Amino acid sequence: MNSILFTVAIFGIACLLVFGISFIFSGLLGLSRRIFLLPYVIISSAFLLYFFYSAVPVTNNFWTHNWAWGLLIAILAGVFLVKNIWSQPASQDKRGKGLFFDIFWFGFAYGVIDGLMLNVMPVVVAGNLINQSTTGGNFSIVLLTAVGAIALSLIITLIYHLGYREFRNKSIMLVLLGNTIITLTFIISGNPIAAVISHTAMHIAAVIRGPETTLQLPPHYEKSEIIYG
């Protein structure tokens, strides 16, 4: 298969994968957030390992390139994202081990997978497609890559979130805005960890504020909708 078509196919598979996970395990089965994350983290981790180390392999330098700029921009974006979290109603009533577990599971694990799948992977796909389609490294190519990266990030973010019933309305626009900001941290700094850190910080802040009232930690249900968990 042509390498460009292969890369496009891999991205298409990623979109179908994340939609299938949110649609089946949340939209159809109504799994609680705690249980829903089991298939999401396991299946997504397997795909990401295949993507980064086989399908569209990256070097070790990919993760550390411009790390200082990445950290700085992640902090700046994180402040904005956390401020948005704190503008939402509070609902956290856990303390001790229960809260620490939620911070790890809903905050760290969920945030890292989201950051890699929705923010880092699309940028790598865009860069790979542009590199295979053009030659040179002038500003127009850099700009085209950035625009393509944002577009692909928006596409997979939209498709993934439409699997949740709660985002089949205007609230999806807030999700797309937040994810665009996170994707830009990678594009601007050149370091993928910037997107992972800022996305994870957003999730951790949402856990501390309260998972049941923060938009950033789907799925949310009415009590009668939860089937398992």
Image (cartoon, rainbow, N blue to C red):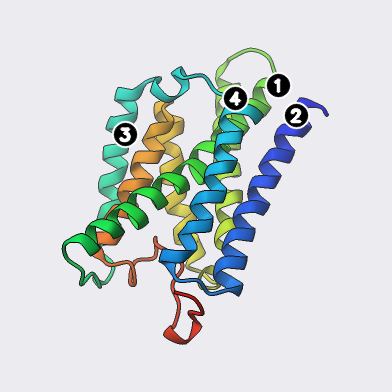
Kind of element beneath mark 1? helix
Is residue 63 shown above or below 10? above
**70 vs 106, nearest the viewer:** 106
Mark whose residue sits in front, 4 or 3: 4
Q: CA distance from mark 2 to mark 3?
A: 31 Å
Ranked by sequence position, the earlier of labels 1 and 4 is 4
The disc placed on residue 166 is: none
Which residue does the numbered mark 1 point to in the structure image?
A: 132
- Which amino acid does the dot numbered 1 rest on? Gln
Which callout, 4 or 2, points at the residue further toward the start of the chain?
Answer: 2
Q: Residue furthest top?
A: 136
Circles 1 and 2: CB atoms closer than 8 Å: yes
Q: Is residue 57 left or right of residue 120?
A: right
First in sequence: mark 1 vs mark 3: 3
For residue 175, side relative to residue 81 (left or right):
right
Asked if the residue under mark 3 is in contact with the one under mark 2, i.e. CB atoms within 8 Å, the reply is: no
Give the spatial CA distance, label 4 vs label 3.
25 Å
Residue at the disc numbered 4: 57
Contact, mark 1 vs mark 3 (Cβ under 8 Å)? no
Horizontal and vertical percent for residue 76? Answer: 27, 39
Q: Image height check: is 35 above or below 131?
A: below
